[in-house]
């Protein structure tokens, strides 16, 4: 199985990332590397080129391939082309909420997950696992008088008068 992601589409579904952030792609790629460490399949994320944008050269790595669509095509077109050229589309999971990408993926036999669903999956896999803490209850302290009263109750003996 390999995963093909519509990058900007996914960024739009992550509450703490913003498409307005100039480092949004790098931040997403870092998260995908962490996610990749929990799964054993390669990940490719595709971003739009953008106007006057020079993509960084060093984003790929750690099992995540980063691709920027060229200035003559969109990321959506690039993703659809990759889906159609994939030699084993039945072993491909496409992450996008774009209807055209989903339709192309399904028509080729690829699996589809919306960006919202994948964002939840990433969050679930990265949620810190809390160890169950054993409850430590402190034994209540009783006065001598209270001890005598309870002993009387349990031993069915009458209480002494001066207590």
Image (spheres, rainbow, N blue to C red):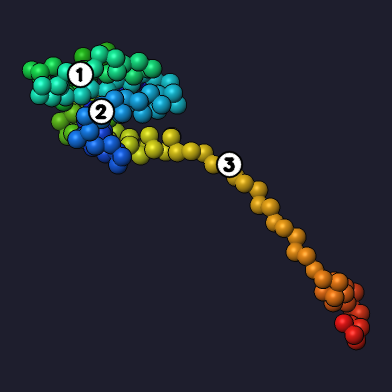
N-term mark: 2 or 1: 2
Does residue 161 appear to the left or right of 128 in the view shown? right
Q: Are marks 1 and 3 in contact (CB under 8 Å)?
A: no
Q: Nearer the viewer, mark 2 or mark 3?
A: 2
Give the CA separation, mark 2 to mark 1: 10 Å
Q: Which residue is mark 3?
A: 131
At 23% from the left edge and 22% from the top edge, which residue is drawn? 46
Residue 118 visible in the snapshot: yes
| Residue at the spot of label 1 | 55
Q: Camera-side residue: 87 or 25? A: 25
Residue sitting at x 40%, y 28%: 35
Against 116, residue 67 (above or below) is above
Image quadrant holding the C terminus, namely: bottom right
Give the labeled residue for mark 2. Answer: 23
Outermost residue to the left: 72
Q: Secondary structure at mark 1?
A: loop
Circle nearer the viewer, 1 or 3: 1
Is residue 121 shown above or below 81?
Answer: below
C-alpha span from label 1 to label 3: 41 Å
Marks 2 and 3: CB-CB under 8 Å?
no
Q: Residue at x 33, y 37 (%)?
A: 119
Residue that appears at 29% across and 33% down: 113
Q: Which badge, 2 or 3, comes first in the chain's sequence? A: 2
Q: Could you tell me residue 83's position as x and y percent?
A: 22, 20
Which percent across, then down, holds residue 124? Answer: 42, 38
SS of the residue under disc 3: loop
């Amino acid at each position: 199985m390999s995963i093909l992601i519509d990058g900007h589409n996914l960024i739009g579904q992550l509450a703490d990332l913003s498409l307005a952030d100039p480092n949004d792609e790098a931040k997403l790629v870092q998260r995908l590397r962490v996610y990749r460490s929990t799964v054993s399949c390669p990940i490719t994320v595709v971003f739009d080129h953008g106007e006057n944008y020079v993509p960084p050269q060093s984003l790929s790595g750690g099992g995540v391939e980063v691709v920027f669509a060229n200035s003559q095509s969109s990321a959506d077109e690039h993703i659809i082309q990759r889906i159609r050229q994939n030699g084993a589309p039945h072993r491909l999971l496409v992450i996008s909420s774009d209807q055209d990408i989903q339709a192309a993926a399904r028509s080729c036999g690829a699996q589809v997950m919306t960006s919202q669903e994948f964002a939840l999956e990433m969050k679930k896999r990265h949620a810190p696992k809390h160890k169950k803490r054993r409850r430590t209850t402190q034994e209540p302290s009783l006065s001598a008088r209270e001890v005598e009263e309870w002993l009387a109750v349990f031993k069915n003996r009458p209480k002494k008068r001066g207590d």
